[in-house]
Image (cartoon, rainbow, N blue to C red):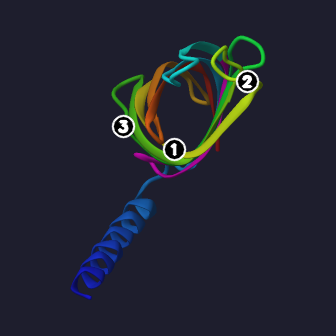
């Protein structure tokens, strides 16, 4: 009971602080990301590299917080692929034209395997969590280049490593 009250009190305080920042900040908006991704998977029988695309979208209620979702699809040797769908916060700050960011996102991952060790094609679907960060370079008021984005994605008892780059469109 005491823990629930403490958690509730912290939540109310954070909501009040966030709303105070939201009223004073003018950098609200929507951003969309699209780019290339390279993925390294640690699936026991089929570890290796895959290439694909990475897209995302999010809303910025205050300048240092993006509430977003991301989807990536990487193709391995046929018929293999890896998909990730994640939702969560991204924290960032502006340093001149650079916008470094860090994030922790939760979601869903799917590996489709066609390994020599397996008879036929197998799919592994599990919830997952992604830890990562990167750097955006602001080149225009409405355009930034995602120079690099690195994520470590935990799926049950294995890790995927995803590296991405691309364009970030800032829609206000």
Residues in magenta, as a range: 52-66
The residue at 42%/40% (across/down) is 103
The residue tagged 2 is 119
* Mark nearer the N terminus (1 vs 2): 2
Query: Mark 2 packing: few (<14 Cα in 10 Å), some, or many (20+)?
Result: few
Q: Position of residue 1 (x, y in %)?
A: 26, 88
Query: Mark 1 packing: few (<14 Cα in 10 Å), some, or many (20+)?
Result: many
Numbered disc 2: secondary structure: loop
Q: Dots 1 and 3: beta carbons under 8 Å?
A: no
147 or 44, which is in the foreground?
A: 44
Q: Is residue 13 above or below residue 31?
A: below
* Res 77 → quadrant: top right
* Mark nearer the N terminus (2 vs 3): 3
142 or 76, which is in the foreground?
A: 76
103 or 44, which is in the foreground?
A: 44
The residue tagged 1 is 128
Numbered disc 3: secondary structure: loop
Cα distance between the residues tagged 2 and 3:
49 Å
The residue at 41%/32% (across/down) is 132
Q: Which mark is residue 93?
A: 3
* Mark nearer the N terminus (1 vs 3): 3
Q: Position of residue 82 (x, y in %)?
A: 65, 27
Magenta stretch encompasses residue 64: yes
Front disc: 1 or 3: 1
The answer to whether one can see residue 60 in this image is: yes
């Amino acid at each position: 009971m005491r823990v629930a009250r403490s958690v509730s009190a912290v939540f109310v305080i954070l909501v009040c602080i966030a709303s105070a920042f939201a009223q004073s900040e003018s950098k609200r908006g929507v951003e969309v990301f699209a780019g290339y991704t390279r993925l390294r998977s640690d699936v026991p029988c089929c570890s290796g590299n895959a290439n694909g695309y990475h897209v995302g979208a999010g809303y910025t209620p205050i300048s240092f917080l993006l509430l977003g979702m991301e989807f990536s699809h990487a193709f391995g040797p046929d018929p293999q692929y890896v998909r990730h769908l994640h939702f969560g916060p991204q924290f960032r700050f502006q340093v001149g034209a650079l916008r470094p960011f860090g994030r922790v996102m939760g979601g869903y991952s799917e590996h489709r395997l066609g390994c020599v060790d397996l008879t036929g094609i197998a799919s592994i679907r599990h919830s997952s969590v992604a830890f990562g960060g990167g750097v955006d370079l602001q080149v225009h008021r409405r355009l930034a280049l995602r120079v690099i984005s690195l994520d470590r994605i935990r799926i049950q008892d294995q890790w995927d490593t995803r590296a991405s780059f691309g364009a970030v469109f800032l829609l206000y």
